Image: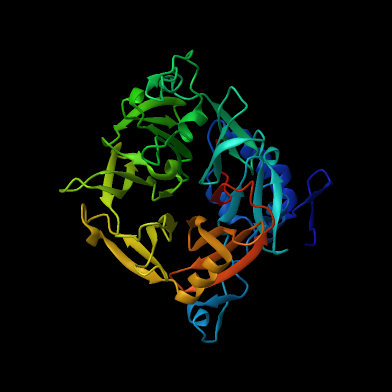
């Protein structure tokens, strides 16, 4: 990039190089305004392409992603020929989260970059890691300030304490048909996020982050169905800086995988739950939505899925997508929901099928029981623990256009327990 010069009234030269302009004028100005009147987030979209490239290359969490320089088509997976050339939008990045590390895919070098949690100003160990609207939310294990909201671009952070009702002594636990009388201890936030019920195989707690980039604000949603939390949803509003009570959690539900299958779509939080719903009252998997505009939970049944396979929930093209194996287990089916059709499986429409050969190849390389899935915009990422040796297999697909691409393997798998996506933004904390 050639640098241009202009002469100021005092005779000195000033640089009009866009990168210098952003670093020395626009970016500091944004940082100064962030705590008062946030600058319009559209500024990010208006920056020159070369400037975005340069800036993102130096940030700890971000990379410029030229989406799939060459990507195979569904038909090619079934033996036909043909290549598709992808677009070059600023996409959400796949991030594998471990106990003390982040693994971020670098398209330019076609490798996974290993990052430390300290690169994004977090403690080395976290029990949960969320991403929405350019912000990350983490629950740290070694800090009195347990909730951390951080923007890796502006390098601004906000530390929060959980609601008071979450800091209560643990109830006495029944062990071996007798009461184990132990001294009460404070319940820490990670106890909630990972509170596993061995009888049902479900989790009691769920935590989510919902960002409104147009209004430059966000909400943290915390819900727990354990007895002493009276099934109330807790909401944090970044504008008021206060916690409040939201809608009542539907009775009798638990969050599947601790809400690990949770997404943000069109300003609402979605997750998979299990409980007794419907006219027959049978235990079933359902889709739960927390609507911030009405402050209430809404529940839908999900399409029938094959037992023994854990379904996935992703955001794709601003739609909620439910992914499950076909009845024969030889393919993946992608369903999109029509929220106008309540309490009916007819509200789901089958929009795509993964070719049998591609799903078979994935299952040959990776164990489906240890597969993770995340999506945003037009990409959906799959990762799975390798069947042979140590490592993680990674696949990216676009089911709408029928495209896919194998990413390089990740060497280590023992530190990877979550898969998230991150999209750069100037969202204030």
Left or right: 25, with 275 as reference point: right
Q: x and y percent of residue 332 in the render?
A: 42, 67
Observer able to see residue 87: no
> Height in image: 83 above or below 258?
below
Q: In front: 216, or 115?
A: 115
Assign the C terminus to one quadrant of the image.
Answer: top right
Q: Where is residue 46 in the image (x, y as percent from the top left)?
A: 58, 55
Q: Give left or right: position of 225 versus 127.
A: left
Residue 183 location in percent, x, y?
A: 49, 12
Residue at the image position 31 percent from the left and 40 percent from the top: 293
Q: How many marks?
A: 0
Quadrant assignment, res 83: bottom right
Viewer can see residue 413: yes
Residue at 55% in and 46% down: 134
Residue 318 pos. (x, y %): 41, 57
**On the picture, is 264 further left or further right than 82?**
left
From this view, report whether residue 99 is shown above or below residue 232. Answer: below
On the image, which quarter does residue 317 sit in? bottom left
Which quarter of the figure has residue 405? bottom right
**Above or below, 360 relative to 243:** below
Q: Which residue appears at 35% of the width and 63% of the height?
A: 335
The chosen color scheme is: rainbow
Q: Quadrant of the N terminus?
A: bottom right
Q: Residue furthest left?
A: 279
């Amino acid at each position: 990039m050639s640098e241009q010069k202009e002469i100021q009234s005092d005779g000195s030269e000033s640089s009009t190089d866009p990168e210098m302009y952003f670093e020395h004028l626009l970016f500091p100005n944004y940082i100064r305004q962030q705590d008062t009147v946030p600058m319009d987030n559209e500024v990010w979209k208006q920056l020159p392409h070369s400037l975005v490239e340069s800036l993102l290359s130096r940030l700890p969490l971000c990379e410029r992603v030229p989406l799939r320089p060459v990507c195979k088509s569904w038909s090619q997976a079934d033996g036909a020929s043909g290549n598709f050339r992808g677009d070059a939008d600023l996409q959400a990045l796949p991030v594998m989260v471990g106990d003390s590390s982040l693994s971020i895919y670098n398209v330019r070098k076609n490798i996974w970059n290993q990052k430390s949690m300290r690169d994004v100003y977090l403690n080395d160990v976290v029990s949960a890691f969320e991403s929405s609207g350019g912000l990350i939310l983490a629950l740290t294990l070694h800090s009195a300030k347990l909730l951390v909201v951080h923007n890796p671009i502006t390098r601004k952070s906000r530390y929060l304490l959980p609601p008071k009702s979450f800091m209560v002594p643990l109830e006495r636990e029944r062990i071996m048909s007798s009461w184990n009388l132990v001294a009460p201890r404070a319940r820490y936030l990670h106890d909630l996020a990972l509170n596993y019920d061995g009888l049902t195989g479900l989790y009691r707690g769920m935590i989510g982050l919902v960002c409104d980039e147009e209004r430059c604000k966000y909400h943290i949603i915390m819900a727990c169905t354990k007895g002493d939390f009276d099934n109330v949803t807790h909401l944090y509003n970044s504008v008021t800086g206060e916690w409040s009570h939201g809608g009542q959690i539907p009775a009798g539900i638990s969050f599947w995988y601790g809400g690990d299958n949770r997404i943000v779509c069109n300003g609402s939080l979605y997750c998979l739950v299990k409980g007794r719903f419907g006219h027959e009252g049978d235990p079933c998997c359902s889709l739960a939505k927390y609507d911030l505009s009405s402050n209430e939970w809404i529940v839908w049944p999900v399409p029938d899925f094959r037992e023994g396979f854990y379904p996935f929930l992703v955001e794709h093209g601003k739609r909620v997508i439910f992914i499950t194996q076909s009845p024969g287990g030889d393919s993946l089916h992608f369903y999109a929901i029509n929220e106008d059709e309540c309490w009916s499986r007819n509200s789901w429409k089958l929009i795509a099928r993964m070719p049998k050969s591609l799903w078979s190849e994935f299952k040959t390389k990776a164990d489906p029981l240890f597969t993770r899935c995340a999506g945003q915009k037009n990409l959906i990422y799959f990762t799975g623990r390798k069947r042979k040796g140590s490592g993680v297999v990674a696949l990216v697909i676009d089911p709408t256009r029928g495209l896919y691409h194998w990413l390089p393997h990740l060497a280590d798998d023992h530190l990877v327990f979550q898969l998230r996506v991150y999209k750069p933004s100037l969202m204030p904390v």
